[in-house]
Amino acid sequence: MSLFSCFLGPHYGHFRLKLVNFELDENHASHETQGLSESFLVVRRGKPFKVTLRFHGRLWDPNTERLFLEISLGSLSEWIPVQFPGQRSGPHRWSATSVPGNVQPLSVTIHICSPVQSSVALYDLLVHIETAEHRVSHEIGKFVLLCNPWLKDDPVYMPLDVHLQEYIKNDYGLLYMGTSAKVCKRPWLFGQYEPGVLEACLMLLQVSPPHRGDSSRDYLSRADPVYLSRVVCAMVNSNDDQGVLAGKWDGSYRDGVAPTDWSGSAEILQQWLSSRCSPVRYGQCWVFASVLCTVMRVLGIPSRVVTTFDAAHDSDGNTAIEEYYTSGGEKLNLSQDSIWNFHVWVECWMRRSDLSAEFDGWQVVDPTPQERSAGTFRCGPCPVAAIQQRCLQVPYDTPFLYASVDADVVRLIVRDGLVVGREVDSESVGQLIFTKSVQSDNPVNLTQNYKCNKSNKQVSCMNKQKMSHNPLASKEAHSGGVTHSLEVSLKVQGVPLLGDPVCMSVTVINRSSRARLLAEHVNAQLKEYNQNPLESFWKTHKQMHIRPFEVLTLRHVIPYLAYESFLAGDDIINLAVVIKDVKTKERGLAAEEFPISAPCITTEIEGGNSIQMRTEHTARATFTNRFDKPLFSPVLTVTGAGLLQGKQEARLALLLPGEKMEKETSIMATSPGTKLLTATFSHSSSCVILTRSYLKVSVRP
């Protein structure tokens, strides 16, 4: 379909502009922008696009009349003379060329081309017709100009088409969550083709503090993807501005939506736009990152969501993480530092014209509001190469991101205000870094892209320890210290399923030539993925003898009854063991964090997961009670944006062990593309959703 606008301008010798055809179908196909907007012409910079002018009465006479286009952004504007083929403008200026041979009477087609480093924005387009005595002017419409990763001279150029399909055009992605021991994947709909998403992305730029402070300077700066990514990163969170998302990591979410309930960016951006830029409640790291990825893909900057497992949050800037444990193995909240089981950010692809070529390529941009960068809650863009090479002086925020993936962990055992034992772990942070692979739902391991060679670390653990801001770190008892003759390790068997016992083994190696009396303390705590552990829910201790050079294995079991009132599916347990030599007070510490796996919901569509648009299909969700006790007031809920209105629920009074609960519903897709069918299960004994499942649905037009 072509878009026509009618303008009845002033008469001049029976000559006036009648219609403007923005050639939407042809331009959008040529510029790889199909589906981004039904309201505006959307084109990419540095590539010509067509506009056809149709006149009334007679055609424009180039011998006596001059034709100009005017491109304007706020108070900025540029006049472009319409030239004939063969005439050239410079590569750094806008150009407009009339195309001969148009078959439509009284019409002229003009090819318009922007400079390759034009600003990303919504432009006004005007046409002026001049003679020696008169000028007739028309406002003929608006168009959106985006970055052009298909064009070699654009700083966001990406050479392989298969990568462009994945990192610009694909509206479906996977988020990796859980722990490095049990990686869970969760689908996400970026939704860049949903109604209102492009408009929300443009509004985000317009209400940003840089634009409100100096709109002309902001418009000129938007040619640079480094600048764009810093503005967008700050605007995805609402901490400093009218940003999109408010973050929340504890307490009730009743005045908004729990972060775990979102499954796509479009609903968030649409809600933000319709509420006149009021922050949407609530987000956590994967929600912030996924919305940022959507916005960057819409603006034309190749982007992907990346998960770092065991990601360090280095709050004091010493690139080391201090953890404190009691002599009984309970982890203490004495440090502002923390290790997140997983943390999600975005990589954006661009040339770094402000740096040397070795730092071109993927850049980390992290919108989760953790620390300020130049006074604003944002992080990046930081070259992945700078993190790997430990070039901590490279902008932006390299030391913080380096610590996220490669900090040392200093675990301190404290008693009566003194440090009585220390273990240094140089391996556990950033063990695994994943993103979705191209054209596949399998993960790609990016760990070696980030991790430097350990021998290249220039700051020793001792130096880091001296830099610590916690006064306890400097109070070390002479009887403690690093253990050399007592080695302790801890291993959990498999990934426990909710309802099953947790089985573990503790291995102690006596490397001394004497027998020893040892005291063992094992402690289990619930842990949020991004915080230090909460209260203990299980502990045990005992004494045992160990012979010289003996390897001793101790086995323990946490029964389901010990954790059922504390944990739900996919919750995380922090498990720690402290072994102490009763005579010498020498101590060894080992710790492990692992998730409790949720029971599954089976979701299926009759006839398969590829369905026809506007055709009715039957979907079915099934949950089986695999616990050894009944579940009271169970609720099985099915939702799916673009597939069904609202939510469909099945409720029972009681679900006995081994019994199945089923919800069958009719779905009909209203638009083509990728959709998600989501099922959740809860019951009265749990204050949270026990488990959820997702089904990827492909809708054919």
Image (tube, helix red, strand yellow):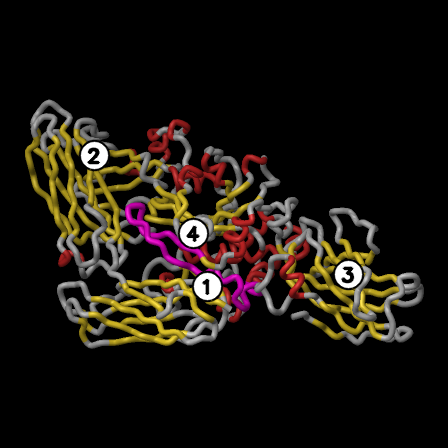
Please give the residue where the numbered disc 3 appears in the rendered image: 110
Cα separation between marks 4 and 2: 50 Å
- Given the image, on which type of amino acid does mark 4 rest? Ser
Q: Residues within 10 Å of mark 1 (few under 14, many from 20)?
A: some
Q: Secondary structure at mark 4?
A: loop
Quarter of the view holding residue 546: top left
Task: Compare marks 4 and 1 and give the one earlier in the sequence.
Answer: 4
Task: Compare marks 1 and 3 and give the one earlier in the sequence.
Answer: 3
- Of residues 404 and 417, the one nearer the viewer is 404
Quarter of the view holding residue 450: top left
Residue 212 on image: x %, y %: 61, 59
Residues in magenta, as a range: 173-200
Task: Compare marks 4 and 2 and give the one earlier in the sequence.
Answer: 2
- Of residues 65 and 51, the one nearer the viewer is 51
- Given the image, on which type of amino acid does mark 3 rest? Ile
Cα separation between marks 1 and 3: 36 Å
Q: Nearer the viewer, mark 4 or mark 2?
A: 4
Q: Secondary structure at mark 2?
A: strand
Residue 240 in view, yes or no: no
Tag of residue 420: 2
Tag of residue 674: 1
- Do labels 3 and 4 touch, CB within 8 Å? no
Cα separation between marks 3 and 2: 79 Å
Cα separation between marks 4 and 1: 14 Å
- Residue ranking furthest to the front: 607
Please give the residue where the numbered disc 4 appears in the rendered image: 440
